[in-house]
Image (spheres, rainbow, N blue to C red):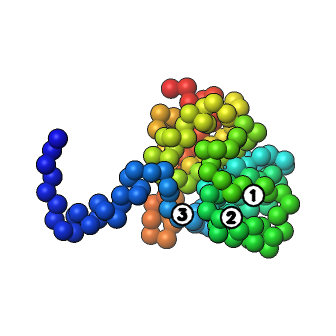
Amino acid sequence: MRNYRYTRQGYLSVLALHPYLFSTDIPWVPTRKELLPHIMRLARIRDGAVFYDLGCGDGRVVIEAALHGAQGVCVEIKRELIEEAKRRARKAGVYERIVFVNDDFFNIDISDADIVYMYLLTKANRLLRPKLEAQLKIGARVITLDFEIPGWKPIHVEKHYVNGFNRSLYLYVKGVSDLI
């Protein structure tokens, strides 16, 4: 075992990251609204398609999908965020097109998904990979923002410069991307 020496500042930064290093708790960072048209284009939503947003936060992506004709499933573990998603969906007039699930996305069945959107860390994507492989039907589309699914090969990658940051959208298709 290595003996690392920490400066006071270095040690404190490791302590601040501690919860994220040893858990799957993911901080909520909203998807920028400027990316929504690109996500919808990649999703290629058809009327009635089932669109899951795993870790939906305030619901902005699944609401946009519902506005494009999808039946949405908004999955969020944090109660206050799922309530905000409901409020926003009512305001947008798509509340009836979305199912709101206040639970951990590892606990839910996603086998009816046509499209899955995830803005999660690589660690969470790695842990979700077996679930995606076991439950998604062939041809289901998976879109991730900024973080890839380790072990899967995206069929398309887009780079967008938004508010001073480079953002990457990865598109995967079950039955293609998972067969490396």
Q: Which mark is residue 82?
A: 2
Cα distance in 3D space between marks 1 and 2: 7 Å
**Type of amino acid under label 3:** Trp
Q: What is the x, y in percent for residue 122?
A: 46, 47
Does residue 104 show up?
yes
Q: Is residue 74 left or right of residue 49?
A: left
Position above or below: 52 against 138: below
**Type of amino acid under label 2:** Ile
Cα distance in 3D space between marks 3 and 1: 17 Å
Residue at the spot of label 3: 28
What SS does tag 2 mark? helix
Residue 19, picture quadrant: bottom left
Q: Are marks 1 and 2 in contact (CB under 8 Å)?
A: yes
Q: Earlier along the polypeptide chain: callout 1 or callout 2?
A: 2
Out of 154 and 103, give the one closest to the viewer. Answer: 103
Residue at the spot of label 1: 100
Q: Which mark is residue 139?
A: none
